[in-house]
Image (cartoon, grey):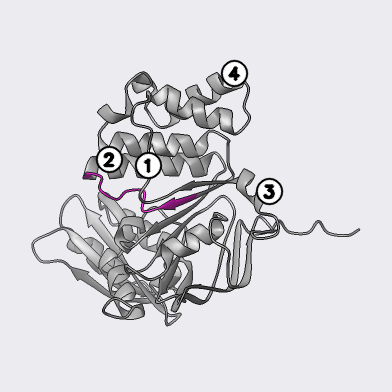
Amino acid sequence: MSETPAAPDAIEVRNLHYSYKRLEALRGLSFNVAGQSIHGFVGPNGAGKTTTLKVLATLLKKAAGDVRVFGMDVTREYKRVRRRIGFMPDHFSMYRQMTVFEYLDFFAAAYGLGLKQRDKVINDVLTLTDMLGRQNDFIRSLSRGMQQRVSLARVLVHDPDLLLLDEPASGLDPRARIELMEILRELRRIGKTIFISSHILSELATLCDSVTIIDRGVTKFSGPMDGLLSLDGQTTSYTLKLAQESPAVEEALKKLPGVLSVARLDGDSVYVITFHREQVATNDLLQSALQSGAQIVSFQQDIRQLNQAFMDLTEPGVP
């Protein structure tokens, strides 16, 4: 009995090239994005992030390489690709004289949705983005954060499987950024694949399953977020925050095989644990901390190490 072939990745990019006249923006870019995941796309300004997104969105035609969305070639099958994607650019124009409902209704009609179907879809996307109570407000009266929510709702009206988001948190205040990230987690939970571009790695550290870092048009790293923290394949670091300082936890963690160091940050009940990833699992670290009587506030990848990895992989200056 033959096996069912594996489903294609949501995004497959191989040796992608693109030039703006004499400027070679993409120089052999390659990466994959698994379906129903959140994938971070990170790089300095001018690295080629927006160009890549526009190629994926079928708005730019690649010069060379193979780019597929759900197995479909973005050049030859661009019409089919467009039905499966939703693209939210960094700088977007909105019909500010429309109400929120009118704006979404316009785009839903453009996608061929009938009147009754449009009403249901618009109600659903406004509920998801927590904008149902503002549907009769004019777009010009909304804050930047609320306009971002409406733009995201607009991307969702035709129920795309893949969301391509270019700096969606740009210009948002801290609360609006946190709320946006929660919406993206909910979208992944209901089965969407999210490809999110940013130049701030720490912003995506707790959101993304995997990440691709590019610089000057080439891939510097692509893989699970954990892999970024252990580019040598051996060690990684996590930050453990406790309700209060606990020498017992520190001693218990140091006794585990594979733990290289447990460093307490000065003046705080926060410990940075460095360990061999192949010798001890993060679950073992948590279990040891709990058994020692610690009250754990948070346990996550060391953001400082993520930032250092980004600096090590990218070059200074604008290309």
Q: CA distance from mark 2 to mark 1?
A: 20 Å
Q: Which residue is mark 2?
A: 176
Residue 313 x/y as whole percent: 36, 79
Give the quarter of the image for residue 279.
bottom left
Determine the secondary structure under disc 1: loop
Residue closer to the observer: 222 or 300 = 222
Identified at 37% across, 73% down, the residue is 236
Residue furthest front as drawn = 21
Q: Which residues are magenta?
A: 164-173
Residue 93's tag is 1
Q: Which residue is mark 3?
A: 80
Which amino acid does the dot numbered 1 rest on?
A: Ser
Residue 124 x/y as whole percent: 50, 25
Q: CA distance from mark 4 to mark 2?
A: 32 Å
Which amino acid does the dot numbered 3 rest on?
A: Arg
Q: Which residue is mark 4?
A: 115
First of labels 4, 2 by sequence position: 4
In the image, 108: left or right of 312?
A: right
81 shown above or below 100: below
Q: Label 3: few (<14), some or many (≥20) within 10 Å?
A: few
First of labels 3, 4 by sequence position: 3
Residue furthest right as drawn = 1
Q: CA distance from mark 4 to mark 1?
A: 25 Å
Assess whether mark 2 and mark 4 are in contact (beta carbons under 8 angstroms): no
Residue 255 x/y as whole percent: 32, 72
Closest to the camera, between mark 4 and mark 1, is 1
Which amino acid does the dot numbered 2 rest on?
A: Ala
